[in-house]
Image (cartoon, rainbow, N blue to C red):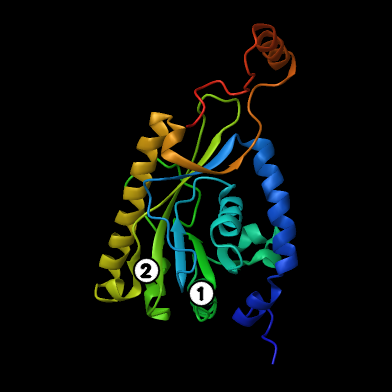
Amino acid sequence: MPGAPNSAEDVLRRRSPRMVALFTRIFRHSLLRDFHAMRFSKSGSLPASGTPHLVLYSNHPSWWDPVAFLLLGDRLFHGRPGFAPIDERMLKSYGFFERIGVFGVDIESRAGAVRFRDIASAVLADPARILLVTAQGRFADVRERPLVLKPGIAHVADWCEDAVFVPLALDYVFWDERKPELLVRFGEATTAAELRARSSRERLALLEQALEESMDRLAAEAISRNADLFTPLEAGRTGVGGVYDLWRRARAGLSGERFTGTHGPEPR
């Protein structure tokens, strides 16, 4: 029996693998056009691609975060359906997001909390699915401290006793190129069992601490401007383009050197 409109069953049904594949290609093109590269930190704790009942929870610095979710899912967890909540007001502007696993919730109301519970429970009922949450619930600068997450993320442990929570730090920085870098870092995992042994306040504090630590480590690596600390997932074009790069290419050719569009040292 099909679910009622906007029910958990309806959210699961609306996600279309064909649309996910289409928008993965579209978003990858957008990323390669607007960013120099997307990289994840080698120092992080990348979860195994088959980790069941996986909950990725992140900070929320940019409009690009859902794009990062989609591309990370395709590269690192290929074939696993991902679902992500967003403010229902934003979903009205991006209705097609429902076709790629995004669902709207009213983050300020009790009804919204109940809806998040119902859908998150349905998502994690299948160990192959992934729940992805921008857990701050609003756009926030990566330097904002203390880190404050919405309490709903801590309650997920009650809805799926086998859930595995992995913090995902996101940052967007300019290094030596004209376009920015999209940097990500996975933190240490916490199991639902570990969270359920604590009070709601202690659970949330534990999740906040894990994500904040990963964000701080990512910030230090971003400040170093050392691409060797990262593994590239996507890479766009380098250089400035136009007359400036034509001149650099010609000068390299005249001197017998190999032309590279990068402005800093190339990653080893």
**Which residue: 34% across, 74% down?**
192
Type of residue at label 2? Ala
Which of these two is toward me, 67 or 156?
A: 67
Q: Which residue reaches farthest bottom?
A: 1
Type of residue at label 1? Ala
Secondary structure at badge 2 equals helix
Query: Could you give the CA–CA distance between mark 1 and mark 2, rounded to whole angstroms?
Result: 12 Å
**Which residue: 49% across, 69% down?**
50
**Which residue: 41% across, 67% down?**
153
When asked about the image quadrant of residue 30, the answer is top right
Residue 104 sits above or below residue 8 on the image: above
**Which residue: 53% across, 74% down?**
128
Q: Mark 1 or mark 2: which comes first in sequence?
A: 1
Question: Which residue is label 1 attached to?
Answer: 120
Percent position (x, y) of residue 149?
Answer: 39, 58
Residue 42 sits above or below residue 54 on the image: above
Quadrant position of the N terminus in the picture: bottom right
Which of these two is toward me, 264 or 124?
A: 264
Percent position (x, y) of residue 57?
Answer: 44, 60
Residue 125 sits above or below residue 267 on the image: below
Q: Badge 1 local density, few (<14 within 10 Å), some, or many (20+)?
A: many
Secondary structure at badge 1 equals helix
Asked whether residue 144 is in view, the answer is no
Lateral position of residue 262 relative to residue 108, left or right: right
Which of these two is toward me, 104 or 98?
A: 98
Percent position (x, y) of residue 96?
Answer: 73, 61
Question: Which residue is label 2 attached to?
Answer: 154
Pointers 1 and 2 in contact (C-beta within 8 Å): no
